[in-house]
Image: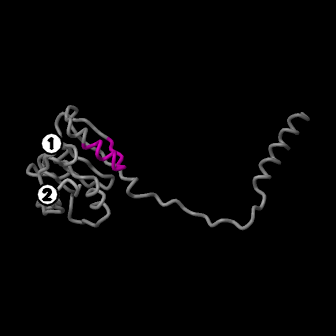
Amino acid sequence: MKLTLAAVVLVATALLAGCKDAGPAKPETTAVPDSAAALTLTVYKTPSCGCCKKWVSHLEQQGVVAQTKDYDDLSGIKERYGITPQYYSCHTAVSEQGYAFEGHIPAKYIRKFLAESHPDAIGLSVPAMPLGSPGMEVEGRFMPYDILLLHKDGSASVYAHISDAAMQ
């Protein structure tokens, strides 16, 4: 019993020593989550698509958390999020807010879109698979492309024109 009581006194003394006044208190800082680091996308892709895997790598290199889900047929996913066939590409990503990102969109434009207000939009699309876009890199080759803003009414407008690889 004496050993146990001595151990309790020793531990209590050590804990209280850490509570001594070390001078004026430092102001508390609250860590504000970095919205850029906190971006998570669910990426729907086919299991065998190599460029989809490269695009996911692009996202991850840009600090995006990409949770991949493989499906043999993505048409149901695209329909669920309101993406019509003329805007299809090989994969569809969905943000936690429910916005859809179709195709090889550079991560920085996804972040930009999510930081803005788009009440009439369902998301962004890079239709087809433009050469030189993230995941479609071929050394020395680049094809300018548009990132489209997809509207809830089924229409689209140009969100950004990517004229060279440095803009990605």
Give percent across and percent down for residue 101: 22, 52
Chosen colour scheme: one colour
Label 1: few (<14), some (14–19) or many (≥20) C-alpha neighbours in 10 Å = some
Number of callouts: 2
Q: Is residue 68 left or right of residue 12?
A: left
Residue under circle 2? 146
Instruction: Identify residue type, mark 1.
Output: Ser
Q: Which residue is mark 1?
A: 75
The single residue placed furthest to the left in the displayed view is 86
- Quarter of the figure with residue 123: bottom left
Ranked by sequence position, the earlier of labels 1 and 2 is 1
- Horizontal side of 162 relative to 114 (left or right) equals left
As drawn, the label of residue 147 is none
Q: Is residue 22 depicted above or below 59 in this figure?
A: below
Measuring 25% from the left and 35% from the top, which residue is drawn there?
70
Residue 55, image x and y in percent? Answer: 25, 43
Kind of element beneath mark 2? strand
Image vertical order of residue 98 relative to residue 72, above or below: below
